[in-house]
Image: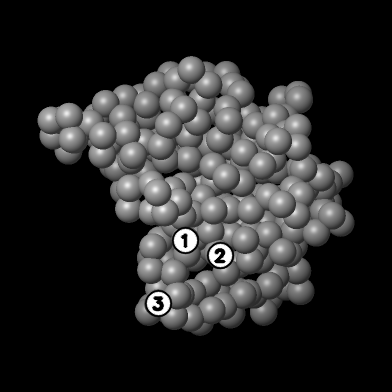
Amino acid sequence: MDQASVCIIGACRDIEPYIHSVLENITTISSWWASSKIVIFENDSKDTTPTLLHDWISLSNNRILVQESNLDAVYPLRTARLAYIRNKLLKYVTPSFDYMLMIDMDDIFNWPVKKESFDSCFSIENWDVITANSNYCKTWHRNGYYDIWALRVPNVIEFDCWAEHHILMHKGYSHEAALQKIGFNHMDYMNTIKVPINVNSAFNGAMICKVSFIKPCCEFIGLEPTHGNGMVCEHVSFQSCLRSHGARIVYNPDFII
């Protein structure tokens, strides 16, 4: 890392309860690289997030804040909104950088980052994209891996978990039983993984990507009109495009955020 450049990108909204920890983590991570740029997208916050971000951005000339409002009206579906935001952030990831680090700026990133977690990624050979593990997910009240929607592991989970959840409920499963079968069972599986594995897609709150694999055609897509309520995980399309250009995507259980 200390010989490479990185563009760190993240999106946030109403993160006042943990913004200080998140920004401290970003500051720490950026110091590990030879050079860095940090780009944060904020939209429609109702708390003090915008003010705190402006204060933090002003402390360094390698930080950029992008802000838009009323995105809920333009993109009422969350995944479409996230795809729009992530694609906006991608425009700042120019070929002058060696790596892109994309992060989620929520409670997942509220834990103090450890350099050995990031170092573990660079002790692994033959990856072009590397995705994270986590300490704790508040949404699911679970330790470890949580991001099943973005996850595609050959011969393990090759489907959209929420689409499959919908199918199971139509077969008579309760919400809880379907969630256990499709969600928690795969979270438990991921928590048994102790060595890096190849995946077709994953995120789990952080992803390091070699910029050379990010082509103009690679974008985040969060909508599929023929798919249930229309929402799909926006990471899957992006990483599918990366793989079409030869990228090897790896999940690293030691890359803990």
Disc 3 packing (10 Å; few <14; some 14–19; many ≥20): few
Query: How far apart in space, not on screen, are marks 2 and 3 (Cα)?
Result: 14 Å
Amino acid residing under circle 1: Ala
Which residue position holds label 3? 73
In the rendered structure, the answer to whether residue 172 lies left or right of residue 46 reads left
Q: Position of residue 67 (x, y in %)?
A: 57, 78
Q: Position of residue 191 (x, y in %)?
A: 42, 24
The residue positioned 86% from the left and 56% from the top of the image is 96
Q: Position of residue 213 (x, y in %)?
A: 77, 43
The residue positioned 63% from the left and 74% from the top of the image is 65
Does residue 135 sit above or below 74 in this rendering? above
In the rendered structure, the answer to whether residue 101 lies left or right of residue 229 reads right
The foreground one among 232 and 2 is 232
Are dots 2 and 3 in contact, CB under 8 Å?
A: no
Amino acid residing under circle 2: Ile
Which residue position holds label 1? 80
**Secondary structure type for disc 3:** helix
Of the residues tagged 2 and 1, which is closer to the observer? 1
Q: Which mark is residue 85?
A: 2
The residue positioned 41% from the left and 37% from the top of the image is 160
Of label 1 and label 3, which has the lower sequence position?
3
Of label 2 and label 3, which has the lower sequence position?
3
Q: Position of residue 165 (x, y in %)?
A: 27, 36
Query: How far apart in space, not on screen, are marks 1 and 3 (Cα)?
Result: 11 Å
Of label 2 and label 1, which has the lower sequence position?
1
**Secondary structure type for disc 2:** helix
The residue positioned 81% from the left and 45% from the top of the image is 212
The foreground one among 35 and 248 is 248
